């Protein structure tokens, strides 16, 4: 078993061992848009089938701003009943973008 598939998804609580819920990276600020990225880990079901279904990668053909990238992830975490900045401390330095 792969070491990175141990544990549970912080958003839905499902075990990473399941194929449907395997661990994936979500790039909060994609490198190809901003040059450097912040990565969080979440299960495939939450990331691809839920997050990107409600928040498609581009709006009207344009890349998201940094504020939109963070705001959409925070809203998604809230919809799952979680606090994004508690689960993912690496996002805390970027809280200023929301104000």
Image (cartoon, grey):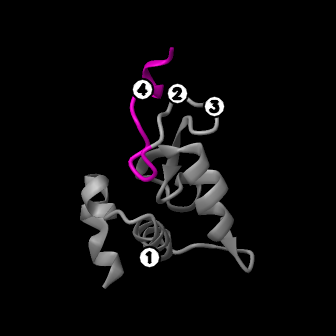
Label the magenta part by its dominant secondary structure: loop
Number of the label disc, if any, that sits on residue 17: 2
Q: Are marks 4 and 2 in contact (CB under 8 Å)?
A: yes
Q: Residue at x 51, y 50 (%)?
A: 26
Tell which tag, 3 or 1, sits nearer the viewer: 3
Rendered location of residue 79, percent (x, y)? 46, 70
Sequence order check, earlier mark of 2 and 1: 2
- Residue that label 4 marks: 6
Sequence order check, earlier mark of 3 and 1: 3
Q: Residue at x 25, y 54 (%)?
A: 89
Q: Locate residue 92: give its quadrant.
A: bottom left
Q: Residues within 10 Å of mark 2 (few under 14, many from 20)?
A: some
Label 4 – label 1 distance at C-alpha: 32 Å
- Residue that label 3 marks: 19
Q: Is residue 73 left or right of residue 58?
A: left
Q: Are marks 3 and 4 in contact (CB under 8 Å)?
A: no
Q: Residue at x 48, y 41 (%)?
A: 14
Mark 1: secondary structure: helix
Sequence order check, earlier mark of 3 and 4: 4
Q: Is residue 62 left or right of residue 12?
A: right
Q: Nearer the viewer, residue 20 or 47?
A: 20
Label 3 – label 4 distance at C-alpha: 12 Å
Rendered location of residue 64, percent (x, y)? 57, 73
Q: Residue at x 45, y 73 (%)?
A: 75
Range shown magenta: 1-13
- Residue that label 1 marks: 67
Mark 4: secondary structure: loop
């Amino acid at each position: 078993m792969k070491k990175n598939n141990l544990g549970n998804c912080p958003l839905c609580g499902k075990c990473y061992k399941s194929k449907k819920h395997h661990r994936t990276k979500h790039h909060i600020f994609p490198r190809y848009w901003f040059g450097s990225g912040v990565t969080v880990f979440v299960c495939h079901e939450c990331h691809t089938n839920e997050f990107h279904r409600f928040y498609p990668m581009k709006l009207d053909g344009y890349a998201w701003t940094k504020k939109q990238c963070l705001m959409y992830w925070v809203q998604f975490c809230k919809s799952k009943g979680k606090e994004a900045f508690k689960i993912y401390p690496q996002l805390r330095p970027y809280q200023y973008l929301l104000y």
